Image (cartoon, rainbow, N blue to C red):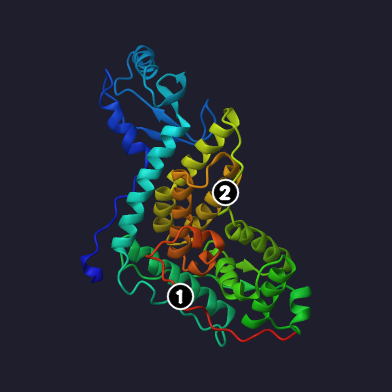
Amino acid sequence: MHIAQVAQIELGGFMLPRVQRLLSEAPLQMMPPQSAQRSPLGALALKLRPVNADPASRDCQRLVDWLQQAAWVEQLALRPPNVYVRPDATVAGEWVQAGMAERWRNLRVCLPEDASCGAELDVRHPSLQQLRHDVVAIAWQRLCRALGQPDRPTPAVEGLDVPQGTLRARAGGSVDVQDLLCALQGLEQSSGGTPAQGPAALRFFLLRWPRGQRVLLTDARLAESQRALASLSRDDSGAPDVEPDGPTAARRRGELAAIVDQLDAALLRALEQQDACPLLRHTLQVAEALRDAHAQLAADSGLRQAAHQAIFAGLYLCGLEKLSSQPRAAAHPHPWIPSDPEPMRSTPCPH
């Protein structure tokens, strides 16, 4: 596929388009539905509003009366001129599963055949500043290509500072790329990880911070980043002991569906901010929500698969597909991710 043939993907989430279609049958004209991060129903609800605000309370009450008969509605809250809705967790999961599958297909189509180019990154010679620029540039290039905007230039990237401390002391006063790799590999070994993840862990660390923010390299920040990385490497491919259905189970499944649904919003923020950082942060949020909902999802759950797809898509678009080579990736193979991506080249750390 030639890049010139790639069309832009229309990003609008997975739930809102379906809710808008359902609202076309309402007995009054409606404004487009919106996500409501804060609402009387808590986070991750939807906000609905009739077009005619006068008399708002009467129109809203008509809407509430109609919504109370809808099978997809779990909870309602009337706050004229708005009506807040929490979709049923099972229905929301089905919407997100179908929407994520479609988004997955679109991303596969829009990625050019040479999407794996740029995965190689030689860490033997560049400065820390140049390394951060290269890591951000690779993620930005992949993101723009996947969303049909390949001609966007790479934005400016801030550098890194290494304050006086144990990291500099161990490196003899001057920290270079290999010193940073060794520090990350030491953290991986101490936490039970594998040293081979070092280059990917370094990419992950450099992408976690907004490109316009100068990064302060400290042992504490490296350790915190390693803990976040562990949430992506957690193996949940085994069959869980599914807990009985109840309010907690439904809430966690609904929260997972709502967070997966925010993938499009994360992609839009990444384009607006010219930075893959918002996408990586969303990927981490999906991984954490999946961990919380693990016991509420069967091993073959469609919502679990949708969450995996969102995680793998985020990792690949950030140039972090090496992190997807965990047991969970083997359990859910996705052929559009290169099976043997070219890793960053590095020299072994001395022991």
Q: Nearer the viewer, residue 105 or 166?
A: 105
Does residue 216 sit above or below 241 in this rendering? below
Q: Which residue is mark 2?
A: 239
Does residue 111 sit above or below 61 in this rendering? below
User: Could you classify mark 1 by the number of other residues whose Cα lies within 10 Å: few (under 14), some (14-19), or many (20 or more)?
Assistant: few
Q: Earlier in the sequence, mark 1 or mark 2?
A: 2
Q: Position of residue 213 (x, y in %)?
A: 56, 64
Residue 48 located left or right of residue 170: left
Q: Is residue 32 visible?
A: no
Residue 179 located left or right of residue 263: right
Q: Which residue is mark 1?
A: 340
What secondary structure is found at the residue carrying circle 2? loop
Q: Position of residue 263 (x, y in %)?
A: 43, 50
The CA distance from mark 1 to mark 2 is 27 Å
Quick one: quadrant of the N terminus? bottom left
Residue 46 located left or right of residue 175: left
Q: Position of residue 252 (x, y in %)?
A: 56, 37
Q: Nearer the viewer, residue 307 or 284?
A: 307
Q: Quadrant of residue 27?
A: top left
Q: Quadrant of residue 9?
A: bottom left
Q: Nearer the viewer, residue 157 or 260?
A: 260
Q: Are marks 1 and 2 in contact (CB under 8 Å)?
A: no
Determine the residue positioned at 36% across, 32% down: 33
Kind of residue at badge 2? Ala
User: Could you classify mark 2 by the number of other residues whose Cα lies within 10 Å: few (under 14), some (14-19), or many (20 or more)?
Assistant: few
Q: Quadrant of residue 205?
A: bottom right
Kind of residue at badge 1? Asp
